[in-house]
Image (spheres, grey):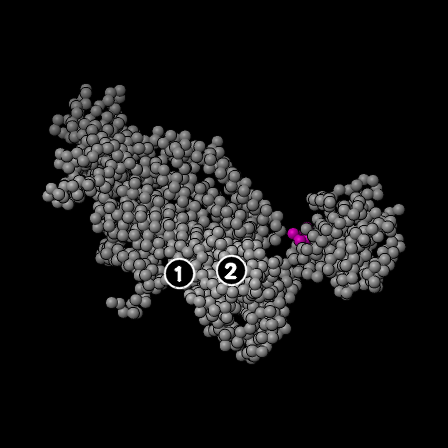
């Protein structure tokens, strides 16, 4: 009987966090034993915080194994999963694995961590003696496709939110942000998000300034940052590398004169100002000062829009590669039955090391 | 003395940069406008071609720009200004982060304990961790560790049972690098000044086998001799006229070319009939007489020769300069009166392009009794070429004669440059200072670490580190990280340590 | 067969290919172009060293040239300068891993070797007496090393201007995210100059000491000397403005570019002005 690949899985799109968390707790070796008991010779489990997937070989057109695994999973995880799961068979399953390895199915499209996780899943299966020729080739191809997509397309670059674009721009000015100082002027949800993004980049210091001292304290406490009174804004500006201006003032809070003074005191160190307030908080002429870069909300949004557009192109290029390679894989699969095994070109992905 | 306004201008770096730009500008002008000191022929040619400009330029000494009073003035002003700048201004920190106030006494320490956050806020690099050591032990261990790391510990304060603090610095010498380099620069300029006041340079062209008296006189005695003779009533400085003799001048060419491989003069230097020194001098190997050095600088053929050899069919004829010789078998007498080492024709007249023997030509006069033919020019390298010269010196192409110029035995002159430069050792000293200063300034980065230990009960304490360095942020960060880590091991720290006060950034 | 020229042609070809790879890498994020660039540069460097070795071998066939470096001719000087440029590039790369800078630095190596092959005469000549001194292995080598470093700094400066322009325009293209940050480029530009400046001044001083031992004067306002001094003054201005006035970024790069223009003029332009340092006349 012909056998083909099947996948049963849940991810961040299909299942709520609680369900995924329950499954993430399952032990991989327990799962391997169970699947082996079902009579499957080749199987692998990919378990990350955003997805839980079981890849296994099953007789073509037979969904009994699938049902049995689902039932067992529901049993051990203590809750229904059937309505959250997706199932693919044959070439669609292969394509799904390739997409996952390429980061196309990830929350942050193009992230590279998943590639290592796919490799780990394969190595675990290999160690458990759950891989044969089919899985060896399948996973080597998946890793190869994942690398190929990342190196030949731009899926990983181009952020698509104002906050992440701000961080990326700050990096093009300062490089790593570990030594950087950020200043939040005012409050606002977008300012908060941007500040959080900066904090995730391990900036050295974050200062919050607000006309209302209490608000400044509250926001600072939230970030575990420091607050400064409104009068200290000019001196805070001198020390800041990245300024997020987001007050509700209807007149510019950061005047060109003020920024010029700060820029002079900064002795040529760049000053990156994000004016994400409406109406504007920063006088437009400040952008003309040397070493001062003022990005308004619309500038950031146009960068985002640009990235979206570019990402569309890159994504379709990536999908093309994935489709192409999964078709190539099914050809190989068919050639196995015919006795004349086809070969892959350029599949120079090393075989995994044998786990002890 | 100075008006405050003027002082402000003089002590500003901006003014010094302005002076430097001025020097750079005029130095560049001097490389484009021909200078009498460097290329006298070109300069003279320029003067003849542009009489109007010349009047204007000469007024400002533009044809000897580098030695004009105003250029010297700018150089001197710059030297003085560098000194003033260094005296008045604190040496700049390489790096622009300002340092937090230093601890100076125990009250300050208490104040800093209160304002710890404010003080630490200014440190670009920070680390905090708890230690499982008593305050005193931790204090000693931290000091010992930093000392082993090459830091110099100073400003130590210790309040038993409460807190201890010290600062540790490394490569403080960097601060002085700038001073040292600038003093070196001024010393170099002083060396140059000494040379231009006390030293001299003179070009002495000497014909081979002849001698020439130098224009400069100098005292040939050594320093020790002068001191010794001072006691016998001799004056300190006894200048004498000096003659330079070149007994033999040799020149060798690379095989098959006219590129000189070596040229050397067997030279003697005499004061009257007293021999001061004798040596075969060649390029890079001068003769030194108590600091006055005789260099083989150049050589040339001035037009004098011992003899030329003519070839008439199978016979050869040797003609000494300006000596008529009868041509055997004919009524003609021939006389060679002039030689040009690198023959060329300028405005229709015979001329030489240089003083190298690249294209020697000889002027011959033929005569039969009292009748003289017009002079004839023969070229050694072009046996078929021949020119006649009329009374005005104009050359005319002539049919090739039945004889050729086979060889020329020229009397060469040796260009000996005599230089006395008492400033040279000072220039070298300045250069060494400059170099050492630069190494200290640019390659030795200053680091300063501030350590504050607070007791947190018996057998444990809190460690606060703040650091600054003139190194690049990224480079120093890695260094500080590893230093903080090793210090943490040393002080038996168990908790996670943070690189800043802000708990966001945790490094385990 | 002149192996010196043959190997230099090979080096030139590899440098040109490496430059092309560097430009492709500038617009295509595929790392393989960066790796290719390095391989090609390494191959070019190997051939270049071989070429220099053969040059030395030919040069030393004339006994009076032993054991001096063959950098007395325009050909030798250009070849050595390109070699030094690539070597300095390699050192910077090994410390900073900024493959993207290849596009701004490698063209100089390709242009340098190319113009040596096209414009200069590779014929070996005996050293004129003034150059028969061990100083020829020190003074020009030190100076050309500093010139090579300044060439690298210039490449970094160009990258900085592009990056600065991109960010100031508020419409950063993809290139913006591929280039190192402004601060990194500024820092790198400064660090190269801070390294090269003392080397330049030491080279000038060494020249002075040589001139003293050969001609009896430390300094003679010869155009080459003068222009080297002007170059040093410009870079000294750069360093002072940076230390004292905190000049950074775009304007600092402009000053350093004026410095590099002086370097180029010192190396090339002055040959038409200088009676002593002219590569074509040989000196004496």
- Please tell me whether mark 2 sits on a helix, a strand or a loop: helix
**Which segment is the magenta one?**
A148-152
Residue B436 in view, yes or no: yes
Residue count near mark 1 (Cα–Cα under 10 Å), binned few <14, some 14–19, many ≥20: some
Instruction: Using residue A77 as the reference point, say whether residue B302 is left or right of it.
Output: left
Residue C4: horizontal and vertical position, in percent? 47, 35
* Quarter occupied by residue B281: top left
Looking at the image, residue A312 sits to the left or right of residue B74; the answer is right
* Res. A172 visible in picture: no
User: Residue most toward the left?
Assistant: B233
* Crowd rating for badge 2 (residues with CA inside 10 Å; few <14, some 14–19, many 20+): many
Residue C191 within the segment the image draws in magenta: no
Which residue in the structure is indicated by mark 1? B92
Lower position in the chain sequence, tag 1 or tag 2 = 1
Chain letter behind tag 1: B
Residue shown at the point (62%, 71%) measured from the top left: A222
Q: Locate residue B247: give its quadrant.
A: top left
Taking the spot 83% from the left edge, 59% from the top edge, the residue there is A76
Answer whether labels 1 and 2 touch (C-beta < 8 Å). no
Q: Quadrant of the C terminus of chain A?
A: top right
Q: Nearer the viewer, residue C140 or B353?
A: C140
Lateral position of residue B340 relative to residue A303, left or right: left
What element does badge 1 sit on? loop
Which mark is nearer the camera, 1 or 2?
Answer: 2
Marks 1/2: CA–CA distance? 37 Å
Image coords of residue C96 (percent x, y) = 53, 51
Image mark for residue B136: 2
Q: Residue at x 36, y 47 (%)?
A: C204
Give the residue displayed 76% in from the left and 62% down from the top.
Answer: A21
Most prominent secondary structure in the magenta stretch?
helix
Give the vertical position of B313 relative to C263 (above or below).
above
Q: Position of residue A102 (x, y in %)?
A: 70, 54
């Amino acid at each position: 009987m012909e056998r083909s690949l099947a996948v049963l899985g849940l991810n961040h799109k299909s299942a709520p966090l609680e369900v995924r968390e329950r499954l993430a707790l399952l032990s991989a070796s327990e799962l391997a034993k169970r699947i082996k008991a079902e009579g499957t010779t080749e199987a692998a489990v990919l378990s990350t915080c955003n997805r839980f997937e079981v890849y296994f070989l099953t007789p073509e057109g037979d969904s009994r194994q699938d049902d049995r695994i689902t039932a067992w999973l529901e049993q051990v995880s203590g809750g229904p999963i059937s309505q959250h799961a997706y199932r693919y068979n044959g070439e669609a399953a292969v394509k799904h694995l390739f997409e996952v390895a390429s980061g196309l199915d990830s929350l942050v499209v193009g992230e590279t961590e998943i590639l290592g996780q796919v490799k780990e899943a394969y190595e675990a299966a290999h160690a458990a003696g759950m891989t044969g020729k089919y899985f060896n080739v399948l996973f080597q191809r998946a890793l190869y496709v994942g690398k190929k997509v990342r190196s030949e397309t731009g899926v990983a670059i181009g952020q698509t939110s104002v906050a992440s674009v701000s961080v990326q721009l700050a990096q093009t000015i300062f490089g790593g942000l570990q030594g950087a100082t950020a200043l939040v002027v005012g409050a606002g949800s977008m300012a908060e998000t941007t500040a959080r993004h900066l904090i995730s980049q391990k900036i050295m210091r974050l200062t919050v300034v607000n006309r209302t001292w209490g608000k400044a304290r509250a926001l600072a406490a939230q970030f575990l940052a420091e607050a400064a009174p409104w009068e200290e804004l000019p001196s805070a500006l001198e020390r800041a590398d990245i300024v997020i201006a987001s007050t509700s003032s209807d007149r510019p809070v950061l005047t060109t004169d003020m920024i010029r003074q700060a820029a002079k005191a900064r002795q040529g160190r760049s000053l990156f100002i994000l004016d994400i307030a409406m109406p504007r908080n920063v006088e437009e002429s400040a952008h003309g000062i040397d070493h001062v870069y003022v990005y308004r909300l619309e500038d950031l949004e146009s960068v985002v829009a640009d990235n979206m557009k570019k990402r569309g192109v890159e994504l379709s290029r990536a999908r093309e590669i994935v489709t192409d390679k999964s078709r190539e894989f099914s050809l190989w699969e068919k050639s196995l039955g015919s006795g004349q095994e086809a070969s892959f070109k350029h599949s120079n992905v090393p075989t995994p090391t044998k786990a002890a | 003395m100075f008006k405050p306004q003027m002082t402000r201008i003089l002590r500003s770096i901006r003014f010094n940069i302005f002076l430097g730009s001025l020097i750079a500008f005029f130095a560049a002008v001097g490389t484009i406008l021909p200078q009498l000191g460097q290329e006298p022929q070109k300069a003279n040619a320029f003067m003849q071609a542009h009489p109007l400009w010349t009047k204007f330029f000469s007024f400002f000494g533009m044809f000897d720009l580098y030695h004009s009073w105003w250029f010297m003035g700018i150089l001197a002003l710059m030297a003085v200004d560098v000194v003033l700048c260094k005296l008045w201004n604190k040496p700049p920190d390489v790096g622009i982060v300002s340092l937090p106030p230093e601890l100076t006494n125990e009250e300050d320490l208490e104040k800093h304990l209160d304002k710890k956050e404010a003080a630490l806020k200014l440190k670009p690099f920070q680390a905090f961790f708890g230690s499982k050591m008593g305050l005193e032990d931790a204090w000693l261990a931290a000091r010992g560790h930093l000392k082993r790391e090459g830091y110099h510990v100073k400003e130590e304060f210790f309040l038993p049972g409460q807190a201890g603090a010290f600062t540790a610095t490394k490569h403080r010498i960097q601060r002085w690098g700038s001073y040292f380099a600038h003093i070196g620069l001024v010393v170099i300029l002083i060396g140059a000044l000494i040379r231009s006041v006390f030293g001299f340079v003179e070009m002495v062209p000497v014909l081979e086998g002849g001698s020439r008296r130098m224009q400069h006189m100098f005292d040939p005695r050594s320093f020790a001799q002068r001191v010794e003779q001072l006691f016998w009533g001799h004056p300190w400085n006894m200048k004498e006229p000096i003659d330079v003799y070149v007994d033999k001048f040799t020149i060798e060419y690379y095989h098959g070319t006219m590129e000189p491989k070596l040229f050397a003069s067997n030279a003697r230097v005499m004061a009257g009939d007293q021999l001061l020194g004798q040596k075969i001098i060649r390029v890079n190997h001068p003769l030194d007489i108590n600091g006055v050095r005789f260099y083989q600088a150049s050589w040339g053929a001035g037009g004098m020769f011992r003899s030329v050899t003519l070839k008439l069919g199978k016979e050869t004829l040797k003609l000494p300069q300006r000596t008529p010789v009868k041509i055997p078998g004919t009524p003609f007498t021939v006389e060679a009166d002039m030689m040009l080492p690198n023959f060329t024709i300028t405005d229709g007249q015979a001329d030489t392009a240089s003083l190298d023997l690249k294209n020697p030509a000889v002027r011959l006069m033929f005569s039969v009794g009292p009748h003289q033919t017009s002079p004839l020019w023969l070229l050694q390298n072009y046996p078929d070429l021949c020119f006649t010269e009329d009374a005005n010196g104009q050359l005319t192409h002539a049919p090739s004669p039945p004889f050729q110029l086979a060889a020329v035995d020229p009397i060469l002159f040796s260009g000996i440059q005599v230089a006395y430069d008492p400033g040279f050792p000072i220039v070298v000293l300045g250069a060494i200072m400059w170099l050492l200063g630069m190494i200290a300034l640019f390659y030795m980065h200053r680091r300063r670490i501030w350590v504050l230990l607070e007791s947190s009960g018996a057998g444990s304490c809190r460690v606060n580190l703040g650091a600054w360095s003139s190194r690049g942020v990224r480079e120093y960060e890695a260094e500080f990280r590893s230093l903080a880590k090793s210090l943490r091991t040393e002080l038996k720290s168990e908790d996670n340590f943070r690189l800043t006060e802000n708990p966001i950034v945790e490094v385990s | 067969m002149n192996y010196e020229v043959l190997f230099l042609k090979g080096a030139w070809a590899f440098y040109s290919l490496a430059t092309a790879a560097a430009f492709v890498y500038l617009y295509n994020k595929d790392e393989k172009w960066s790796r290719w660039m390095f391989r090609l540069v390494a191959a070019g460097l190997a051939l270049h060293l071989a070429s220099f070795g053969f040059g030395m071998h030919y040069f030393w066939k004339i006994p009076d040239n032993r054991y001096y470096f063959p950098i007395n001719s325009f050909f030798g000087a250009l070849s050595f300068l390109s070699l030094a440029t690539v070597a300095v590039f390699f050192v910077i790369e090994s410390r900073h891993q900024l493959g993207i800078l290849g596009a701004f630095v490698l063209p100089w190596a390709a242009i340098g070797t190319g113009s040596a092959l096209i414009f200069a005469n590779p014929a070996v000549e005996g050293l004129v007496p003034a150059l028969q001194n061990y100083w020829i292995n020190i003074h020009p080598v030190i100076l050309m090393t500093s010139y090579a470093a300044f060439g690298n700094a210039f490449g970094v400066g160009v990258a900085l201007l592009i990056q600065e322009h991109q960010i100031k325009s508020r419409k950063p293209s993809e290139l913006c995210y591929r280039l190192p940050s402004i601060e990194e480029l500024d820092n790198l530009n400064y660090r190269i100059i801070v390294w090269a400046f003392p080397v330049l001044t030491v080279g000038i001083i060494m020249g002075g000491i040589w001139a003293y031992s050969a001609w009896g004067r430390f300094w003679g306002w010869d155009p080459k000397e003068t222009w080297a001094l002007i170059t040093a003054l410009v870079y000294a201005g750069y360093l002072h403005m940076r230390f004292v006035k905190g000049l950074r970024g775009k304007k600092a790069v402009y000053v350093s570019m004026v410095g590099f223009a002086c370097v180029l003029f010192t190396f090339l332009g002055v040959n038409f002005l200088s009676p002593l340092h002219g590569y074509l006349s040989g000196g004496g």
